[in-house]
Image (tube, rainbow, N blue to C red):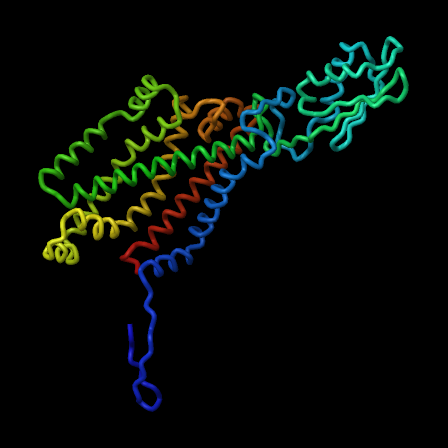
Amino acid sequence: MTETVLTHDNKPSEGVVKGRSLLDTALLRLKRNRAAMVSLWVIIGMTLAAIIGPAVSTHSYDEVYNHFVGEKPSIGAYPKQEQITPITERALSRARVDMEDINISKDNVKISVVNRKQEPLDPRITRYLMRADIFQNVSLEILKADPQRGVISADIKPLRFLMGTDQNGRDLLTRILVSLRISLMVGALATGVALIIGVTYGAVSGFVGGNIDNLMMRFVDLLYSLPFVFFVILLVVFFGNNIFLIFIAVGCIQWLDMARIVRGQTLQLKQQEFVQASEALGVNQGNIIKRHIIPNLAGTVVVYMTLLIPRVILLESFLSFLGLGVQEPLTSLGVLIAEGARYMRNDPYLLIFPALTMSILLFALNFLGDGLRDALDPKDR
């Protein structure tokens, strides 16, 4: 766009003034919304933690530590001396040797032993120690001090449970990261299914109109009348528990709201001059929907999508809470909250950490949705 500007001597000079697109305006408005921007970075951080966290964690989400069941959240290293000593004494007594002393450093344990038979120590006595879960995956070696006495040295890898362990001895932090991944994956994929089906269905129904519109909307009403939980139970009965059933069940229901919203917006858009001009030029209905209707629905669809993801996550958590969703050893936030609710009296951290994770995620998604709604609302420009 060119604009003529008068200088101080009233001589015209042409200058180029760069215009601002609607997308640039929306992004500028979004950046000014601090709550939405903070929420956006929170969502990005949680997504990266869900993707990378389980891979870099020193624990596996299904690894069971029998000697560390119900450990409270701590930054200290495990195993501790009071946990190693009784296990070591019992194991060595079966090998017919006595423990004189035990010394545990940061990543090494040294056990002074004496053979009851006054004979040189047999290196095979380390097998008795390695059978104990607490010494698994470590290297045990006898360092002989004299023919009857010796030192059993083991390099141990210290374990840390920053959020404690559950009632099965599994690291809670790793399981929360995996559950966050599952919940985000269910939310994203189910929302994607609802987006594709709902936008296409609603745009076609609203633009075509007439009897076809009535027939398509009556089909939507028919699906609305089906009980969702009953539908999920039927899927579980016929196909068994499978995480992909969650995608199917949630995606087959959530697109109904999207279709209705898109249909209502399409009924307004098809009365606009640019759509009528396209019809007058002979553009077919498919191209009008693809090039004019759907692009102008982007703002509404994006806003509803950010509000649909938390609904899907809550729905998946509800199904998992009822035992119809993700099954062990895989986990989700709903599964962890259900388990934490059983032990909240004695171990409240089992409920607090997963519930806090879900609350932060849902608040961030809702704040981001509100920010996108304000940024994309044409009435506020």
Q: Which image quarter: residue 188? A: top left
Q: Is residue 240 visible?
A: yes
Residue 247 picture location, percent across and down: 35, 31
Q: Residue at x 32, y 54 (%)?
A: 376
Q: Residue at x 36, y 28 (%)?
A: 246
In depth, the one of 306 and 149 nearer the eye is: 149
Q: Residue at x 31, y 33 (%)?
A: 251
In depth, the one of 177 and 355 nearer the eye is: 177
Residue 314 picture location, percent across and down: 39, 33
In depth, the one of 268 and 216 nearer the eye is: 216
Q: Residue at x 68, y 33 (%)?
A: 76
Left or right side of 347 for 317: left
Above or below, 244 relative to 188: above
Q: Which image quarter: residue 24? A: bottom left
Left or right side of 146 for 328: left
Total number of numbered labels? 0
Q: Is residue 101 visible?
A: no
Left or right side of 240 for 267: left
Residue 244 picture location, percent across and down: 37, 28
Above or below, 6 relative to 189: below
Q: Quadrant of the N terminus?
A: bottom left
Q: Residue furthest bottom?
A: 9
Residue 381 picture location, percent across and down: 30, 60
